[in-house]
Image: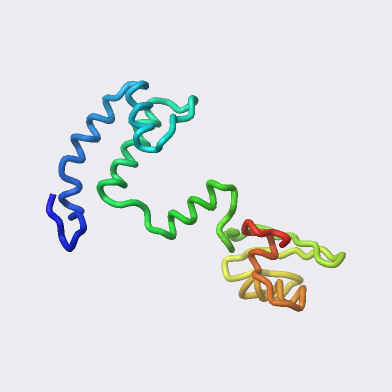
Amino acid sequence: MIMESGKTNRRDSADGLSGHITALEALDRAGCCTRWRAAFGNAPPKHLSVAFMRDVLIWQLQCEKLGGLPPDVDRTLRRIATGRQAAGAASPGTLLIREWNGRTYQVEVTETGYVMDGRTWRSLSAIARHITGAHWSGPRFFGLNAKVGT
């Protein structure tokens, strides 16, 4: 492998990758479990198929050799994995409902913004400020992140 400025050259990291992938594709269940423990530090869940374990092990090898996911993608996937949505991740057509001081507010997410009481808003934060009279994170106010209600 050739080193450039202390970093592994991506092209050289790919050299030999196909041989490692071929070896992973030939593993049986016991071999997959052994490699899984080495790669992730614990045994795989019992319900995983051998084909799925092979795919994950190949993906992990590729990340190791060629680099992992970009940081923003990694953060988004971690949020999803822990049951939290990315802030502001409501798609068009979604209806957000929030009760505040005895009144229920409904906001429809559109392609161009947010609609509440017939008025279009550019951000959820502006709507939250309108409702509460104080600065709020709109996604937080409407429960689109993990800190709902705090």
Q: Quadrant of residue 87?
A: bottom right
Q: Is residue 147 left or right of residue 79?
A: right
Q: x, y (%) of residue 142? A: 69, 62
Q: Is residue 2 left or right of residue 28?
A: left
- Which of these two is toward me, 66 or 131? 66
Task: Give the residue at x 73% y 60%.
Answer: 149
Task: Give the residue at x 71% y 72%.
Answer: 128
Q: x, y (%) of residue 49? A: 43, 26
Q: x, y (%) of residue 141? A: 70, 65
Q: x, y (%) of residue 121? A: 65, 75
Q: Is residue 37 left or right of residue 17?
A: right
- Which of these two is toward me, 93 or 128? 128
Q: Quadrant of residue 116?
A: bottom right
Task: Give the residue at x 38% y 32%.
Answer: 37
Q: Quadrant of residue 90?
A: bottom right
Task: Give the residue at x 38% y 58%.
Answer: 70
Quick check: 34 above or below 3? above
Question: What's the colour scheme?
Answer: rainbow
Q: Is residue 60 left or right of residue 146?
A: left
Residue extending farthest right: 102
Q: How many marks?
A: 0
User: In the rendered view of the protein, which quadrant contains the C terminus?
Assistant: bottom right
